[in-house]
Amino acid sequence: MSANILLAATSDDIQMAEIAVKRLLTVLLCCLSLMLSAEPQHQHDYNGSHGMVLFAANDTLLVSHLPLYRPPHDYQLVYEVILPEQASKAVLAELSQTRQLTLLPENFDLRQMIDAGQFTLTADIYQGHFEREGTLWLSNLPVRFVRQLYKRRLNNTDVIAGTIKYATFTSAGQQFMLHQIGTAPSFDQILRVSEWPQTLQFDNADAQSATVQLQQQGIEVQQLYLESRDFSL
């Protein structure tokens, strides 16, 4: 009799174990299904409209991604680009007159820039800001993205509150400073400078006063781009 009881108990244990395994497999399959369904959405997030401002280092054309605080647009990215010869000459001539030009490529995956890839996109160029009454100037141009010069994901914790901090990069023998966007209110700013300053951090400053402090150090400064509306409170 005791043997029968033991066999019955063993049988019950096996059944309970089988049920537990089935439940575990069901949970794992559900988790896997959720992961797979979320992946295309994650990929889609980076595909979209990503505008840029154009500027130049001598005869080399550069673009700076126009960032926002919200993902996936929360990246400061600077790239060297190549346009067709005639378009390049026209763009350089416009920029030499300190006119603002913005570039709006076809929708693409921003991770191509984030990952420092080389790629070609079709793009339009606007005189002025393409989202703020800018005028379409050149259209359907092949733009070759050839070299990443700077990358930073916006992170409010890496810029001390009350300070203005810049990053630096060079291209075609010229030196540039890019403001590291911080907690709102902040700003996006690109400067061309004749030499590096003694410090890249300015306390209790704004875009204008930081530029003045650079000039007081005997540094020639040309502001190429300034945007504050997208980074206001």
Image (cartoon, rainbow, N blue to C red):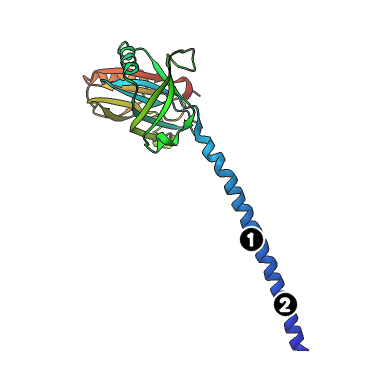
Name the residue beneath numbered marker 1.
25
Which residue lies at the image location 36% right of the left edge and 12% below the top edge? 99
**Three-letter code, disc 2:** Ser
- The front one of 223 and 97 is 97
Which residue lies at the image location 64% right of the left edge and 60% below the top edge? 25
Q: Position of residue 46 (x, y in %)?
A: 50, 35
Q: Which element is circle 2 on?
A: helix
Q: Which element is circle 1 on?
A: helix
Residue 169 shown left or right of residue 225 in the figure: left
Name above or below for residue 17 compared with residue 63: below
- The front one of 114 and 82 is 82
Residue 38 shown left or right of residue 188 in the figure: right
Name above or below for residue 132 compared with residue 41: above
* First of labels 1, 2 by sequence position: 2
Which quadrant would residue 29 be assigned to in this image?
Answer: bottom right
- The front one of 143 and 65 is 143
Q: Position of residue 207 (x, y in %)?
A: 36, 20
Numbered label tally: 2
**Three-letter code, disc 1:** Leu
Q: Is residue 71 visible?
A: no
Name the residue beneath numbered marker 2.
11
